[in-house]
Amino acid sequence: MPTRAYAAQSATSPLGPFSIERREPLAKDVDIEILYCGVCHTDIHFARNEWGFTTFPVVPGHEILGRVRRVGKDVTRFRVGDLAAVGCLVDSCRECSSCKAGLEQHCLKGSTFTYNGADVHSGGVTYGGYAEGIVCDEAYTLRVPGHLDPARSAPLLCAGITTYSPLRAWGAGPGKKVGVVGLGGLGHMGVKFAKAFGAETVLYTTSESKIADGKRLGADHVVISRDADAMAKHMGSLDLIVDTVSADHDINSLLGQLKLDGALVLVGAPPTPLALNVFGLLMPRRRIAGSLIGGIAETQEMLDFCGKHNVVCDIELIPIQKINEAYERMLKSDVKYRFVIDIASLKSR
Ligand code: NAP
Ligand code: ZN
Ligand code: ZN
């Protein structure tokens, strides 16, 4: 079915109106009318082909929340009218060891990502949530607790799970001192989760203007990462740091903040390689790791946690016509703290 969307036609063109074709729902598919879609920095990396593997035109968007308007005949978990959400994944093989372990994002046969992924049903590539609707297998469709604000919940589907998962995997909790680097979409959720899990939480930011917000969002300490004296105060004292920075930056000074066996977990994905001074790893025995979103079951666990603890994102709601402006503001680290597109605006263009 023809579906209105917004796409980038090339790495240098702004996003603009575009029409895509969504498949008719198959037996296990849910057809969702999209209400809100969060704007992730990954969308910018793809729209501008910064990682070098974008297929154009690209319709970004993987923080998708909407209402079910049709269901396939074998769908059991959703009914017409339910709230439903789609994150970064729409399919995977379901049989490999990763899929069986609930790590569909690491499917050995290749996960199908929500946009710019190989579309096994329609051919070509998948198109994301900057669109009025999406069709997704119910096994990859998430439930959002009904009492949470839907616009403020949409970014949980990527910014939420991408920070929740490493904080859980590396045991953020009481008695642990945990850092989050960068107060953007991912970072502000990292701070909220680290605090909610009971860890002593340190925010590292380059923006002096974000100190008060960092504390309001839950950080016990806010450190300006370019201030050597402020960094010296926490040297060698953290168990874990989750680094959400989207551009080149100094990871060696961050490594210096970790104690013995502490881990720096990179979730930000700068397009260019980061410089590593190995001595920061050797002394005293530190680790660097990475983490990619989270599996479907863990994403549902995160949403349920948010429902129980009333955790949602801090957002700026925009019409889709402002998307190019929003990208420019994100590149200046100027967003409080996630843009969310009101998809109703697509119909009024
Ligand atoms: P964002 O909202 O733009 O936030 C990034 C933050 O990083 C900025 O707000 C800024 O925070 C800091 N920053 C930016 N440039 C910097 C620089 N040159 N030096 C130091 N700090 C800088 O981006 P996002 O949506 O949170 O995404 C962040 C990164 O994570 C992107 O690369 C994205 O592709 C990646 N990502 C990865 C996964 C995954 O599964 N691993 C999932 C989603 C996104 P301050 O102003 O506080 O310094
Ligand atoms: Zn994302
Ligand atoms: Zn698999």
Image (spheres, grey):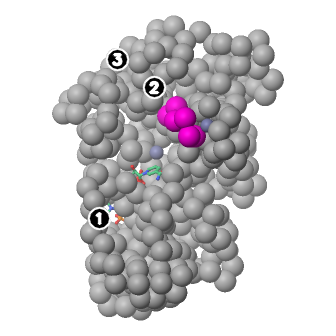
Q: Residue at x 54, y 49 (%)?
A: 293
Q: Is residue 110 magenta?
A: yes
Q: In the rendered structure, which amino acid carries the disc numbered 1?
A: Leu
Residue assigned mark 1: 274
Percent across and percent down for residue 278 are: 33, 78
Residue assigned mark 2: 118
Cα distance between the residues tagged 3 and 2: 19 Å
Q: Is residue 221 above or below residue 154?
A: below
Tell me which label, 3 or 2, sits earlier in the chain.
3
- Asked if residue 300 can be seen in this view, the reply is no
Is mark 3 in CB contact (under 8 Å) with mark 2? Answer: no
Q: Which residues are magenta?
A: 107-113
Give the left or right position of residue 16, taking residue 84 as reference.
left
If the image is split into quadrants, where does the C terminus sit?
A: top left
Q: Residue at x 54, y 58 (%)?
A: 163
Residue assigned mark 3: 18
